[in-house]
């Protein structure tokens, strides 16, 4: 399948998505041309789901950055919290930048089914994000109780609570899984910004890229619809919306 055909498939759900590889190439160009930094001066941290597909489809060129520091757990929520954010903030080169890529993921198969992908060596499709689908199933069946967070399944319980707080919105949406992914994105975006506000950085910039990460079948690859591309200049505290750069 050609790239434009793959994009047509993904654009039915996410009209602004680009390939994840293209997003990485553009961000590296941005770092070099707009921030005048080398990728090796940038510490990458990602808050993406632990799902093995995200390791398989991780773009190779990200190896030009330092890291990645892994912040995410089930469906990408930044479970390493303030301690995790503080840890890599203290590892970044003095004149460099922190680059945080975050957002929930969702599958779209090559026949256009949302919430599933075909994985290597399997005859059937499987859920993606499995955690989001599991939490949504419990929401639909009224199996989530307010405040029910256990030590045994802590991360899953947090995802359940996020959806529970948006129950009506999710259940009345044309695609509850699409909507659940939007709700989880908003929760992650809010939390990342809270963590950034409470963290001390000893470098020049913080780059925030918030996105919906779209995984497709093993022979199609991954895509990203960027929702936030902010650069915070730590000297002036000015935050610049750099989203238009990705559209060029
Ligand atoms: Zn997942």
Image (cartoon, rainbow, N blue to C red):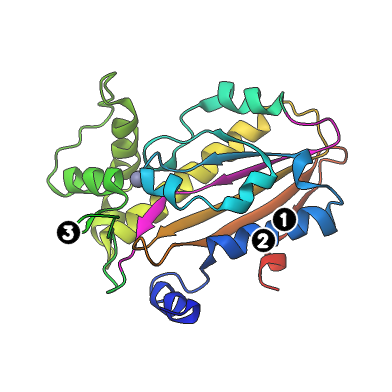
Vertical order, 7 against 189 (above or below): below
Q: Quadrant of residue 107?
A: bottom left
- What residue did someone put label 3 on? 124
The answer to whether mark 2 and mark 3 are in CB contact below 8 A is no
First-in-chain label (3 vs 1) = 1
On screen, residue 76 versus residue 42, left or right, reads left
Residue 144 at what x, y percent from top left?
20, 36
Magenta stretch: give its range: 92-109
Q: Is mark 2 within 8 Å of ligand 1?
A: no
Q: Report the label total.
A: 3
Q: CA distance from mark 2 to mark 3?
A: 33 Å
Could you tell whether 207 is left or right of 219 in the image?
right
Local crowd size for mark 3, using a 10 Å CA cut-off: few (<14), some (14–19), many (≥20): few
Rounded to the nearest whole Å, what is the CA distance between mark 2 and mark 1? 5 Å
Rendered view: 42 above or below 106:
above
* Front position in the image: 29 or 17: 29
Q: Are marks 2 and 1 in contact (CB under 8 Å)?
A: yes
Of 155 and 194, which appears nearest the observer? 155
Q: In the rendered structure, does residue 106 fall within the stretch colored magenta? A: yes
Residue 11: % across, % down: 44, 75
Per the image, is 26 magenta? no
Alpha-carbon span between mark 3 and mark 1: 36 Å
| Residue at image location 29% in from the left, 73% down from the top | 112
Name above or below for residue 200 compared with residue 235.
Answer: above
Q: Residue furthest front?
A: 121
17 vs 149, nearest the viewer: 17
Disc 3 element: loop
On the picture, is 154 further left or further right than 69? left
Give the quarter the ligand 1 occupies.
Answer: top left
Q: Which mark is residue 25?
A: 2
Residue underneath mark 1: 28
For label 1, the SS is: helix
């Amino acid at each position: 399948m050609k790239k434009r055909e793959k994009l047509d498939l993904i654009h039915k759900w996410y009209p602004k998505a680009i390939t994840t590889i293209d997003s990485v190439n553009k961000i590296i160009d941005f770092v070099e041309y707009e921030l005048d930094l080398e990728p090796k001066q940038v510490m990458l941290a990602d808050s993406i789901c632990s799902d093995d597909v995200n390791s398989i489809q991780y773009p190779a060129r990200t190896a030009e950055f330092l890291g990645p520091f892994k912040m995410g757990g089930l469906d990408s929520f930044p479970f390493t919290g303030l301690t995790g954010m503080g840890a890599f903030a203290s590892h970044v080169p003095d004149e460099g930048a922190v680059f945080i890529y975050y957002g929930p993921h969702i599958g779209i198969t090559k026949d256009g089914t949302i919430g599933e992908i075909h994985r290597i060596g399997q005859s059937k499709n499987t859920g993606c994000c499995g955690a989001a689908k599991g939490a949504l199933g419990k929401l639909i069946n009224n199996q989530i109780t307010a405040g029910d967070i256990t030590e045994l399944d802590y991360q899953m319980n947090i995802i359940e609570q996020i959806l529970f707080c948006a129950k009506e919105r999710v259940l009345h949406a044309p695609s509850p899984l699409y909507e659940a992914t939007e709700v989880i994105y908003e929760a992650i975006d809010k939390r990342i910004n809270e963590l950034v506000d409470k963290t001390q950085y000893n470098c020049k910039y913080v780059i925030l890229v918030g996105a919906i990460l779209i995984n497709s079948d093993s022979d199609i690859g991954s895509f990203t619809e960027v929702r936030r591309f902010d650069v915070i200049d730590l000297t002036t505290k000015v935050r610049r919306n750099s989203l238009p750069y990705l559209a060029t």
